[in-house]
Image (tube, rainbow, N blue to C red):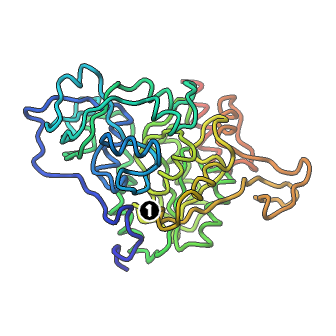
Amino acid sequence: MSADNLIAPHGGSLVNCFKDGISPEGCPKITLSSKQACDLEMIAIGAFSPLTGFCNKADFESICKDMRLADGTVWPIPITLAVTEEEKETLQEGGKAALYHEDGTFLATIDIEDIYPHDKALEIPNVFGTEDEAHPGVKQVIDEGEWLVGGPINVATVTPEVEPGEQFTEYRLPPAETRSLFANNGWKTVAAFQTRNPIHRAHEYLCKCAQEICDGLLIHPLVGETKEGDIPADVRMDCYNTIIEHYFVADYTALSVMPAAMRYAGPREAILHALIRKNYGCTHFIVGRDHAGVGDYYGTYDAQNIFDNFTAEEIGIVPLKFEHAAYSMKAQGMVSAKTFPKLEGDQIFLSGTKVRELLSQGERPPAEFSRPEVADVLIEWATATVTA
């Protein structure tokens, strides 16, 4: 099967911003934050298609107000390049700037279309549904520069020359490569599972329900910037590989990483995650309880209900809306409100937050919570962290 027979990317074509011969010579310098570097990579590889660069003013305002680009295409979160007053003074509309990683690596140039005030009063309440500075996404925007630079990018590389930690090169497949993988596997329908936590029993249940519907499953963890307290990406990758080895069928399961930064924007981020997976070639997207949420800022199913604001043609990928799953002691397995009656004291509800709490106390997650092989990985990491 050809990759051309898969679902079309958002906007119709897959963006590729890599170009030969890109040079920073003569350009003013902008040093990217971790979030901005993640965004640059997502734009460059086509994961943010149809975006070809950072948002100009018209797109920024339209996205914040209406969850659409200025041309009407659905897009829920502005992808912005915020700069300081000092950086802004070196820039001019119609000119170029060189974009650098925090470690000093030259990454790309931007053709500057707009330089405009960062309207945080517009962005924050619309995107996050709250102005509470305790929300990590809100705090991140508050701390950003007061000016935004918009325009297309021309990319030399997205990989810094020197960066601590794991790049996950083997699993860092851009959309063009996941599409080729699906085509080679003969998968016409593919369900994507987004996660920033190790897969626990409820996640496994959702994934396997989706596998009964689709030809294949893409387990697609986010390995870009996350908030303090989240389990490190390398530990999570060990967990994913472990659970796939012991509890999934390799012929119907793929693992790749998504180098995006978390916004913790709940409903709007659920739409973003779905559109991204459409670009990667997936036809279905698992949306569980409080997708991309944090704390108590969003309702349990707000991230599912937001899809009802758009037509199927506008989104182009099918959201798989799952009920909150739990382990039933009577059923001796995973159940939901649709599949098993709720009996008092019977169900053990699971969450990534609860896993982190147990690990921080040096406690092993129970079998109802996490597969034993995965629990082994987690407790080994937690023990090493405590003793380090």
Percent position of residue 229, x then y: 56, 31
Q: Amino acid at mark 1?
A: Lys
Question: How crowded is the residue under tag 1: few (<14 C-alpha within 10 Å), some, or many (20+)?
Answer: many
Q: Residue furthest right?
A: 344
**376 or 100: nearer the viewer:** 100
Q: Quadrant of the N terminus?
A: bottom left
In depth, the one of 128 and 32 nearer the eye is 128
* Residue 20 sits above or below residue 246 on the image: above
Query: Residue 79's quadrant in the figure?
Result: top left
Question: What residue is pinned by disc 1?
Answer: 278
Residue at screen point 85% across, 54% down:
329
Count of number-bearing discs: 1
Q: Residue at x 42, y 65 (%)?
A: 281
Can residue 271 be spotted in the picture? yes
Horizontal arrangement in the rendering, residue 189 relative to residue 37 (left or right): right
Q: Nearer the viewer, residue 385 or 346?
A: 346
**Could one spot residue 191 in this view of the protein?**
no
Q: Residue at x 34, y 63 (%)?
A: 177
Q: Position of residue 355 (x, y in %)?
A: 67, 39
Q: Quadrant of residue 116?
A: top left
